[in-house]
Amino acid sequence: MLAACALWIHGEPPLLMYLSAVRDFDHAITLFRRQGCWGAISKTNHAPLRYRDPVYRGLRELAMSYFHEYTNRRGQKTLRSYSRTFDLRRVDPKLWVTNPENCWGVVERLLDTRHYRLINARQERGLRVSGPFVRKSFDLPQYPHPHKRA
């Protein structure tokens, strides 16, 4: 929501998309457009779910750019759906800009936004598990937990 607020301050719509997963954590990303193509700003401590350059022609294409790397600790690909855009201008700024402790209502509204499946049941059954090398690379945090530093 911080990224959405920053874009809004600079005159762009504060748009979010919700990525829903199975056996894993869901994730919200901030959307923006450049020259008719979608990009995303995302905050997570792991590299795969971060920023996306504005090169995606549609929201499904953008969501699919997260598919391969969206895995749980067992290496299972877990991303299943994405929401339509959610414009934060529909929500009182007190609930997401000036008092972030109240942002859970926004999350509930994101969950209620229409979602679109990324894969069907047959495709889901055929998914391969990521190998150990790929899984290990996902565990390289940009910012190590402060209690685990040497």
Image (spheres, rainbow, N blue to C red):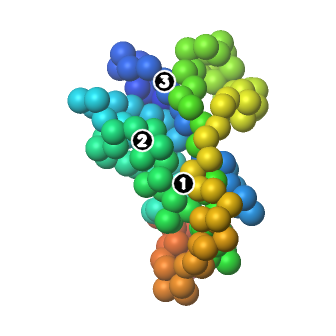
> Residue 88: percent from the left, percent from the top?
57, 21
Q: Is residue 17 visible?
A: yes
| Circle 3 residue | 14
| Circle 2 residue | 40
Tell whether 65 sits left or right of 82: left
In the image, residue 99 above or below residue 70? above
> Label 3 amino acid?
Pro
Q: Classify mark 2: residues with Cα within 10 Å, few (<14), some (14-19) or many (20+).
A: many
Mark 1 vs mark 3, CA separation in Å = 19 Å
Tell me the residue at 34%/30% (across/down): 33
State the SS at label 3: loop
Mark 2 vs mark 3, CA separation in Å = 11 Å
Kindly check if marks 2 and 3 are in contact, taking CB atoms under 8 A apart as contact.
no
Tell me the residue at 44%/20% (across/down): 13
Q: Quadrant of the N terminus?
A: top right
State the SS at label 1: loop
| Circle 1 residue | 44
Q: Residue furthest bottom?
A: 132
Give the label, 1 or 3, closer to the camera. 3
Mark 1 vs mark 2, CA separation in Å = 13 Å
Kindly check if marks 1 and 3 are in contact, taking CB atoms under 8 A apart as contact.
no
> Residue 125: percent from the left, percent from the top?
67, 71
Q: Classify mark 3: residues with Cα within 10 Å, few (<14), some (14-19) or many (20+).
A: many
